[in-house]
Image (tube, rainbow, N blue to C red):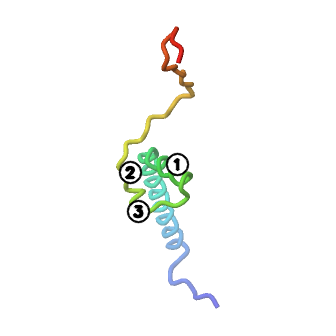
């Protein structure tokens, strides 16, 4: 059996609006934090793909590292250690 409300429909509407403001504000704040820490999150994600599980020490180590710059799809030229005309 449902308990009757101790407040009016208007009060209920105001409560709902305030809750919605709080939720929206916290969602915005969470999105900003994620955006500000995107590189760190990417580093942790790569480590998780490699190891599947991370210990606290692993995460701390990752977070202390500087993020690697994004690589462009450039092929490395192979260099031959022998000079032209030399036979080995």
Q: Which residue is mark 3?
A: 56
Residue depicted at 53% across the width and 73% down the height = 12
Callout 3: SS? helix
Choose the circle earlier in sequence order: 3 or 2. Answer: 3
Q: Which residue is mark 1?
A: 46
Q: Which residue occupies the foreground of this view, 83 or 3?
A: 83
Q: Which mark is residue 63?
A: 2
CA separation in Å, label 2 and label 1: 12 Å
Check disc 1: other Cα within 10 Å, few if <14, some if 14-19, many if 20+: few
Callout 1: SS? helix
CA separation in Å, label 3 and label 2: 11 Å
Callout 2: SS? helix
Residue depicted at 49% across the width and 68% down the height = 14
x then y, percent, for residue 20: 51, 62
Check disc 3: other Cα within 10 Å, few if <14, some if 14-19, many if 20+: few
Residue depicted at 53% across the width and 56% down the height = 51
Q: Residue furthest left?
A: 64
CA separation in Å, label 1 and label 3: 16 Å
């Amino acid at each position: 059996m449902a308990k009757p409300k101790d407040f009016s429909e208007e009060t209920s509407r105001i409560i709902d609006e305030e809750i919605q403001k709080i939720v929206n504000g916290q969602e915005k704040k969470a999105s900003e934090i994620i955006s500000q820490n995107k590189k760190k999150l990417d580093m942790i994600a790569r480590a998780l793909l490699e190891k599947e599980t991370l210990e606290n020490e692993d995460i701390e180590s990752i977070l202390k590292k500087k993020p690697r710059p994004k690589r462009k799809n450039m092929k490395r030229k192979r260099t031959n250690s022998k000079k032209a005309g030399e036979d080995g």
